[in-house]
Amino acid sequence: MGTDTIRWVNKSRLLGATVDEKLTWALHMLDLKKGFARKFDLIKRSRFLPKEVLINFYFRVILPSVTFGLVLWGLCSNGLQCL
C-alpha cells in the first residue's frame, strides 16, 4: 500500500477472532476450545465458592465468550468460508 509493504502471515487475530490464511474458522475454534477448557477448569477448582458467585462467573465470563461472534458464525453455515 503506497510505499509500505504488507507482510504475509499464516494467521492473524482481529477483534477477538483468529483468521487463517484460508479464511476458515479452524484456528479460531481451537482458540475458543482452549479458552473454554481453562474457564471451566477454573469453575471446577472454585467449587468451594458460593453458588451465586459461580453463577455470576458463568454469566459474566463464560456466556459472553460463547455469544461473541455468534452473528458471524451464523453467516458461515453450510460449510461456507467467510469473514
Image (cartoon, rainbow, N blue to C red):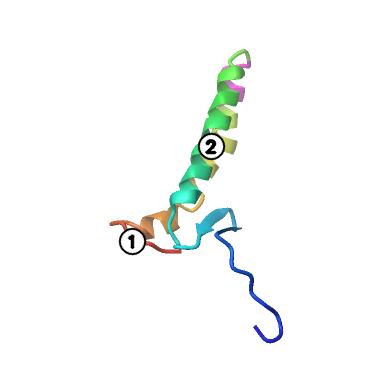
Q: Residue placed at 56% from the left, 25% from the top?
A: 41
Magenta stretch: includes residue 52? yes
Give the residue displayed 44% in from the left and 62% down from the top.
22
Mark 2 lies on residue: 34
Q: Quadrant of residue 51?
A: top right
Q: Main secondary structure of the magenta part?
A: helix
Q: Which residue is at the front of the view, 55 or 75?
A: 75
Looking at the picture, how far across and down is residue 30, in whole percent? Answer: 48, 43
Give the extent of the magenta segment. Answer: 49-54
Of helix, strand and loop, which one carries label 2? helix
Q: Quadrant of the N terminus?
A: bottom right
* Quadrant housing residue 43: top right
State left or right for residue 75 relative to residue 68: left
Q: Position of residue 3 (x, y in %)?
A: 71, 85
Q: Residue at x 49, y 38 (%)?
A: 33
Q: Position of residue 39 (x, y in %)?
A: 57, 31
Residue under pointer 1: 80
Mark 2: few/some/many CA within 10 Å (<14, 14-19, 20+): few
Residue lying furthest bottom: 2
Q: Amino acid at mark 2?
A: Lys
